[in-house]
Image (tube, rainbow, N blue to C red):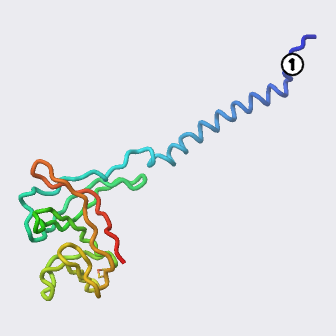
Amino acid sequence: MSDKKRVSRRQFLNYTLTGVGGFMAAGMLAPMVRFAIDPVLKSKEGGDLKSVASVDEITKEPQRFEWTIDQVDGWYESEVQKTAWVYKDDNDEIVALSPICTHLGCTVDWGSNDEYPNEFYCPCHGGRYTKDGDNVPGTPPTAPLPVFEHETKEGMLYLGEAKDRGGA
Ligand code: FES
């Protein structure tokens, strides 16, 4: 009799069934794991700057510009319309403000209220913002309008994400 340990029929069956079972389980779980973490593996879309308007179109008076971005939300891809109020300030710097009221999310308009012609006005609860987007104290909004990150290239204005500016 040799010193080699012999594998019994029962052990052989155990090893074989464990191996085959493990292989089958891995085959079933791998696609599920891949499906679960797929959005994490994809590169983030929609964060790039988008061409919105010619710099020549931008005036001292805020104008509303619209553009679309491709948005990926989990497994759902869609085209989303974005809007910004854009103007040149006294130093000829471009300012791009979000039109979303920081009170409860209505859309603000520039100069739409005759009593406050040089302000952004929110019709929902009478929220007001100065031209640079600061909320007027005593009105419902407690934070200024978010500002879009932007850059100009070859005579075009590119806008990215709107960034909150904080507030009380
Ligand atoms: S949502 Fe704009 S003031 Fe309330």
Q: Is residue 12 above or below residue 24?
A: above
Mark 1 C-beta to ligand 1 under 8 Å = no
Identified at 17% across, 75% down, the residue is 131
Which image quadrant shows ligand 1? Answer: bottom left
Residue found farthest to the left: 56
Q: Nearer the viewer, residue 15 or 156?
A: 156
Q: What residue did someone put label 1 on?
A: 5
Q: Quadrant of residue 160?
A: bottom left
Q: Nearer the viewer, residue 15 or 136?
A: 136
Few, some or many residues within 10 Å of mark 1 (<14, 14–19, 20+): few
Identified at 68% across, 35% down, the residue is 22
Q: Which amino acid, by three-letter code, is at mark 1?
A: Lys
Q: Is residue 43 above or below residue 54?
A: above
Identified at 9% across, 71% down, the residue is 61
Q: Is residue 155 above or below residue 123?
A: above
Q: Quadrant of residue 147?
A: bottom left
Q: Nearer the viewer, residue 11 or 131?
A: 131
In percent of width and height, residue 165 lies at 31, 68
Q: Quadrant of residue 62?
A: bottom left
In percent of width and height, residue 166 lies at 34, 71
In percent of width and height, residue 120 lies at 19, 78
In percent of width and height, residue 64 lies at 15, 68
Q: Is residue 114 above or below residue 47?
A: below
Rendered-image quadrant of the C terminus: bottom left
Residue found farthest to the right: 1
